[in-house]
Image: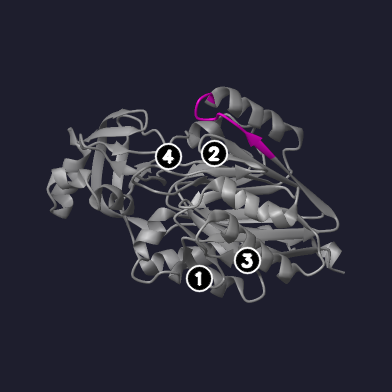
């Protein structure tokens, strides 16, 4: 076997010690195999540079990519205030990581840099992490070449302060793009799913601007939710309701009658919804609600899609990028979403993941797609011919 993976997880007082302990666990599981890539999912409560220093103290110049999250995931379940490190080792594959700084300040220029990188080898599997609070990921996806093999997520963290970051190599920050590219004897399969369905309530988006949905049916957006759920409109501007609104996203009707999920980051003091993707005036929108059973079924479906996309390759690592709404929904049963993934995946495949503010998946022959509210399962596998 030329492709191996291992996952470590730790919780300590500071980021350096936590990153070091998690990496030590993963290296011990790898044995003598040399890692070619590290994926880090770190609690936003740790300083990014400290986490990097802890990991790099054991791995040296190994390419490193990662993002912040309110909680990490492994096969053992959910891990708040922790660091999860996944290491990939290979003899017939390699990885490279780029850090593109200043995306939120100069999005068009950095988007063009990213597009130029992806154009060189469009079929090469690539993983991208970008800021979830300030980046326009939908615009970023639209600016990329069609057919590129790109998957990733938007980093999350403290919903109240907007504190989040990405990691690319030895660099980190809130406003940059972190890109990892894989080449050689390696295959990547991607599957998606979500458990939110329309409940019959229809809205017309009557005023929006950029990331803000101002009015639904001519009323402040919070008033529309107040009428439905019984809480006064003013209470939707404060915790916990201003963030729990993500549990009730909008399903925007598309030309093919499918519903595109768009989720609020929060509800503002003026009653508008702060999104992380633009919503057009005049859009028809439906209230969506999720259920535990539907999300667990969607998680299993995402695994099955990813397995099918591997086309016979042996999976060695599962990366799970799940919307923060799932964490809210499963609060009474923390880790039940990961348990559903593990059940579908079966034993023996290391798993690492975290909660995100949006997901990016390949668009087939089109440009990559930006999603809200989904679980994305990424299976990294060894091609069948290498297993013989």
Q: Are marks 1 and 2 in contact (CB under 8 Å)?
A: no
Residue 44, percent from left and from top: 47, 51
Where residue 381 sits, quadrant-wise, is bottom right
Tell me which numbered mark, 1 or 3, is placed earlier along the sequence. 3
Cα distance in 3D space between marks 3 and 4: 28 Å
Pointer 1: what residue? 77
Cα distance in 3D space between marks 3 and 2: 23 Å
Q: Determine whether the residue tagged by mark 2 lies in a helix, strand or loop.
A: strand
Cα distance in 3D space between marks 1 and 2: 27 Å
Asked if residue 100 lies in the magenta stretch, the reply is yes
Cα distance in 3D space between marks 1 and 3: 12 Å
Prevailing secondary structure class for the magenta stretch in the rendered image: loop
Q: Determine whether the residue tagged by mark 4 lies in a helix, strand or loop.
A: loop
Residue 214, percent from left and from top: 25, 32
Front-lying residue, 315 or 96: 96
The mark lying in front, picked from 1 and 2, is 2
Tell me which numbered mark, 4 or 2, is placed earlier along the sequence. 4
Where residue 89 sits, quadrant-wise, is bottom right
- Residues packed near mark 1 inside 10 Å, few (<14), some (14 to 19) or many (20 plus): some
- Residues packed near mark 3 inside 10 Å, few (<14), some (14 to 19) or many (20 plus): many
Using residue 288 as the reference point, say whether residue 350 is left or right of it.
right
Pointer 4: what residue? 133
Pointer 2: what residue? 173
Cα distance in 3D space between marks 4 and 1: 26 Å
In this rendering, the count of numbered labels is 4
For the record, the magenta segment spans 98-106
Front-lying residue, 174 or 376: 174
Q: Determine whether the residue tagged by mark 3 lies in a helix, strand or loop.
A: strand
Q: Are marks 3 and 4 in contact (CB under 8 Å)?
A: no
Kindly identify the residue that appears in the image at 57 percent across and 60 percent down.
18
Residue 8's disc is 3
């Amino acid at each position: 076997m030329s492709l191996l993976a291992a996952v470590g997880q730790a919780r300590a007082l500071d980021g350096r010690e936590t990153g070091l302990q998690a990496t030590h666990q993963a290296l011990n599981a790898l044995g003598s195999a040399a890692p070619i890539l590290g994926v880090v999912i770190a609690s936003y409560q740790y300083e990014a540079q400290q986490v990097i220093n802890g990991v790099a103290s054991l791995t040296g110049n190994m390419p490193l990519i990662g993002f912040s999250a309110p909680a990490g995931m492994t096969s053992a379940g959910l891990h708040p205030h922790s660091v999860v490190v996944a290491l990939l080792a290979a003899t017939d594959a390699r990885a490279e990581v780029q850090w593109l700084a200043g995306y939120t300040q100069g999005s068009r220029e950095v988007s063009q840099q990213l597009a130029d990188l992806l154009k060189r080898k469009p079929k090469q599997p690539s993983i991208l992490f970008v800021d979830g609070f300030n980046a326009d990921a939908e615009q970023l996806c639209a600016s990329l070449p069609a057919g590129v093999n790109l998957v990733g997520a938007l980093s999350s963290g403290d919903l109240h302060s907007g504190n989040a970051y990405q990691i690319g190599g030895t660099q980190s920050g809130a406003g940059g793009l972190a890109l990892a590219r894989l080449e050689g004897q390696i295959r990547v399969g991607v599957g998606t799913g979500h458990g939110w369905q329309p409940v019959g309530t229809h809205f017309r988006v009557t005023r929006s601007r950029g990331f803000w949905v101002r009015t639904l049916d001519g009323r402040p957006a919070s008033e529309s939710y107040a009428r439905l759920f019984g809480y006064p409109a003013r209470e939707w501007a404060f915790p916990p309701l201003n963030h729990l609104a993500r549990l009730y996203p909008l399903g925007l009707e598309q030309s093919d009658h499918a519903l595109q999920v768009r989720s609020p980051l929060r509800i503002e003091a003026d009653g508008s919804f702060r999104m992380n993707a633009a919503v057009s005036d005049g859009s028809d929108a439906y209230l969506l609600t999720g259920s535990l059973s539907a999300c667990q079924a969607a998680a299993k479906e995402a695994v099955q899609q990813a397995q099918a996309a591997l086309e016979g390759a042996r999976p060695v690592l599962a990366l799970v990028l799940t919307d923060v709404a799932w964490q809210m929904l499963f609060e009474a049963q923390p880790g039940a979403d990961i348990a559903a993934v593990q059940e579908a995946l079966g034993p023996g495949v290391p798993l690492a993941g975290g909660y995100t503010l949006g997901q990016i998946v390949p668009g087939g022959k089109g440009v990559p797609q930006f999603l809200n509210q989904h679980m994305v399962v990424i299976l990294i596998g060894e091609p069948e011919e290498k297993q013989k």
